[in-house]
Amino acid sequence: MPSLDRSTGPLYRAIADALERDIRAGRVANGTRLPPQRALAETLGVDFTTVTRAYAEAARRGLVEGRVGQGTFVRTGHAPAPVASEPRQAARSTDLRMNAPPLPAGLDLRDKLRQEIGAFAAELDLDLLLRYQQVGGGPGDRQAGAAWLKGRVDVGPEQLLVCAGAQGALLSLLSVLCEPGDVVCCEALTYPGFRSLAAHLRLRLAPVAMDGDGLLPDAFEQACRSHRPRALYCTPTLHNPTTATMPLERRRSLVAIARRHGVPIIEDDAYGALAPQAPPPLAALAPDAVFHVSGLAKPVSPALRIAYLTVPEPRQISRLASAIRATTGMASPLTTALATRWIGDGTAAGIVEAIRRETAARHAIARETLPPGQVAADPAAFHLWLRMPEAWTRGEFVARLRSPDLGIGIVASDSFAVSTPPEAVRIGLGAAEDPRSLRRALQQMADLLSEAPAMSSMIV
């Protein structure tokens, strides 16, 4: 029964502070099993989620550790360092530029990783993991990839390669499908990493116009006639940055046009696992015409830089494996083994579900905070697209947020634009450390948008 000081900040922090005081005073010994979260919530008369966040905060400080199927325990033999007070500016700074999955409340992935690495030492052949592995993944890892995709893209392991992240998969694909100087079509707003790859390989990008539902088939048809592209790259589900998900009929139209002009499609399905209600991927509609890339970094964790590349025909595997060997060598054996393990035991699916819940909660904060009518959002995406009101430009808004008194980072549309950038910015909801810091940053954005740009300027 902790003694809580409810006047100094959020209640979940007060619970974590009380636990830390009791551990340091010796009132709670190392190795002690803490009360179940629901029981403590009932005893204290607080919400269950408050206790969940308190335990997560205690784990972040190194005070406790979760043990699967057993509960939460004070970390044995560990003397936690004092919690340093953050400088005023550091406490204000919130970087929302990266489009990273949020850390779900009550789920300590760091502790889970520690447990899994220990399990590797006990259960896996570490000598084997320390050697070079089969390019494109061994049979078990390819089978895990096929299991991960099942229900969205049903393929056998013979049509799948394990790659060093989605960027590695895209690099291999482009190096096989294209030559320097070739044209590749893409959405007018596209993934910055793809733009970088195209520049590196000296490819020319032909932007295809979009609307609120994504890429426009008629515009793609015109681009095929005008440019004779070697490929089309697109993100039909939870598009980055606009969050658009392409409707089924538009997907079918797009596939029909690509077939008619003999243009292979590279489908970046980075967020598909987060959107179970989305239409089938393009690869499910046209398995003979689509190269499908599905990574684990977005729906599970950036720690798992693993992607599964599905090819239209098994005979293409050999050439793509050669490209992987020439560019990235192979995916990390340790990371691949962890991905295979988490897919097989259901951990990956559990993390995806937890990320969905946390993402939905963060969207609720955005709906409560940001001005209506300016935001394009999907509750399954952990980013949103904010269109500038008439008085503001994207550059001025980004610069003002980045100023020392606010210290908020977001991304202007210029990073995504293949042609003229619109007056809009992307906000990474998952990049905030917790919902409280996200709410503070979004409220500061809303306050700024409510002013005329000249009123917020300190230029003299």
Image (tube, helix red, strand yellow):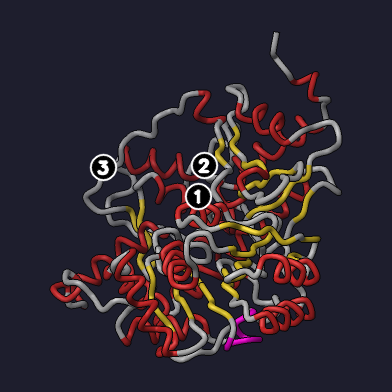
Disc 3 from disc 1: Cα separation: 19 Å
> What's the residue at 35%, 83% (across, down)?
318
Residue 451: x and y in percent read 82, 26
Q: Is residue 286 magenta?
A: yes
> What's the residue at 69%, 40% (across, down)?
442
Looking at numbered disc 2 in the image, what kind of residue is underneath it? Arg
Look at mark 2 in the image and give the residue it sits on: 13
Secondary element at image label 2:
helix
Q: Is residue 276 visible?
A: yes
Examine the rendered structure and indicate whether residue 276 appears above or below residue 222.
below
Residue 398: x and y in percent read 66, 33
Examine the rendered structure and indicate whether residue 411 appears above or below residue 340.
above
Residue 245: x and y in percent read 72, 68
User: For the view shown, which residue lies furthest in the left direction?
Assistant: 127
Find the magenta span and give its range. Answer: 282-288
Marks counted in the figure total 3
The answer to which quarter of the image holds residue 421 is top right
Which circle's residue, 2 or 3, is located before the other in the chain?
2
Look at mark 1 in the image and give the residue it sits on: 54
Look at mark 3 in the image and give the residue it sits on: 79
51 vs 187, nearest the viewer: 187
Q: Is residue 27 magenta?
A: no
Residue 263: x and y in percent read 62, 77
Which circle's residue, 3 or 1, is located before the other in the chain?
1
Q: Is residue 273 visible?
A: no
Q: Are marks 3 and 1 in contact (CB under 8 Å)?
A: no
> What's the residue at 52%, 24% (across, down)?
89
